[in-house]
Amino acid sequence: MSSSFGNLFRISTFGESHGKGVGVVVDGCPAGLKIGEAEIQAELDRRRPGQSKLTTPRKEADAVEVYSGLFEGRTTGTPIGMLVANTDQRSHDYGDMVDLYRPSHADFTYDLKYGFRDYRGGGRASARETIGRVAAGAIARKILKEVCGTEILAYVSQVGGIDANLDPLSATFKMVEANPVRCADAAAAIKMAAAIDAARKSQDSLGGVIQLVVKNPPKGIGEPVFHRCEAELARAFLSLPATKGFEIGSGFAGTRLKGSEHNDPFVNKSGKSKGKGKQQTVQSASPLEAIGTSSNRSGGVQGGITNGEPILCRIAFKPTATISLPQQTVDKQAKARTLAAKGRHDPCVLPRAVVIVEAMAALTLVDLFLEQRARAGLFPISKLQQASEIADRQGVSSKGKKWKREDAYDR
Ligand SMILES: Cc1cc2nc3c(=O)[nH]c(=O)nc-3n(C[C@H](O)[C@H](O)[C@H](O)COP(=O)(O)O)c2cc1C
């Protein structure tokens, strides 16, 4: 069972729902990043259970302890070990699940694969595993913010049949955190909250969609073939429990348009404010810097590579599998049984999944960014870039030199 993710910024999560604790080891985090436990804790607090009646009532402080890799408020470049203790386990609630398989949960497939499983609280299949991802994601997010000015925000855009109605680019952290659903549309949030509460009261559950918006992403990251940026994002999001779908940009709806309607026209965006960000690019100081698109049906990725426009994705989450309504199932002997599940469960996983989606976006993008940084610039693709690097080394500024189109492929 592999529990690691990422190449250069590599995380390994560990722990089960009712074990002693859950956590993560982050290997490959660059040294010198200013970050404190409080920043990591702030993200974990957004993921924590028991936040409202819309989430599981399990009471966990989810207090992070950083064991290594941070010193005097900075990363040291050594593995960062982080642990969160489990304190509110009620394993007796899971007595039925020793022999019974919860419909659409992981009980049956774990037995099929391993022949043995920690059934308490869902064991490793519990969303408590995602604590490690969120703690590591807080560090990844800080790197992207510091180096590229990247802003990563997600919100609940659909619960059951209720849709949020707003431009994703207009969503702010304040709007998202203003209600327990984490929906950036306040009017829709009220309807969503009522629907989740009704599902909870009727011992049922609801699913929905999370919208991700990444503003000021690093430009030029992602590989053209197997490790396309959208492929890496899809893998990251679909590695989350309860996910059922991924779309980027126009997604499935785009299939209904003609090419002339769907294409994103290129425009010169020089002079237009790009916000506070300091986007990193493969080719700094070239005219390519000024080029953007006037629409963004590509969702910020073309040819597998980020083009600098916001990355827009949607991730579908199914209704929570464990519900108290009686369900048809079988036991380990394949004998037909009925299960009315006990235990404390999220009537809808979406409000807590928002922060986990943000964390996976940060982990994916920081890894692709570090890979790009490791390769780019070794053989500069413009003379100006080459000249500026030499000038920088010699302490001579190359500002004011005119970049010529033919320089781009001539080295
Ligand atoms: C934030 C979050 C909270 C979740 N809470 C529950 C829960 O309370 N009960 C449950 O049965 N599943 C919950 N899940 C989903 C299960 O972990 C998931 O269904 C299970 O691992 C099986 O995987 P699959 O649904 O991807 O097939 C949650 C998922 C997330 C992302």
Image: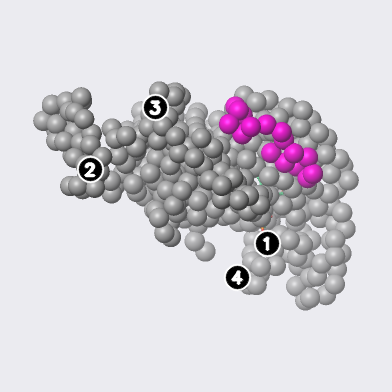
Q: Disc 2 residue type?
A: Glu
Q: Is residue 97 visible?
A: no
Along the line of sight, the residue nearer the viewer: 150 or 36: 150
C-beta proximity under 8 Å, tags 2 and 3: no
Along the line of sight, the residue nearer the viewer: 63 or 235: 235
The residue that mark 3 highlights is 270
Q: Tell me if residue 195 comes above or below residue 223 in the rendering.
A: above
Q: Give the x, y percent position of residue 64.
A: 53, 37
The span from disc 4 to disc 1 (Cα, nearest Å) is 12 Å
Q: Disc 4 residue type?
A: Tyr
Tell whether position 102 is magenta: no
- Disc nearer the start of the sequence (2/3): 3
The residue that mark 4 highlights is 114
The span from disc 2 to disc 3 (Cα, nearest Å) is 21 Å
The span from disc 3 to disc 4 (Cα, nearest Å) is 57 Å
The span from disc 3 to disc 1 (Cα, nearest Å) is 51 Å
Magenta span of residues: 157-172
- Disc nearer the start of the sequence (2/4): 4
The residue that mark 2 highlights is 406
C-beta proximity under 8 Å, tags 4 and 1: no
Disc 2 versus disc 4: nearer the observer? 2
Q: Is residue 319 visible?
A: yes
Disc 2 versus disc 3: nearer the observer? 2
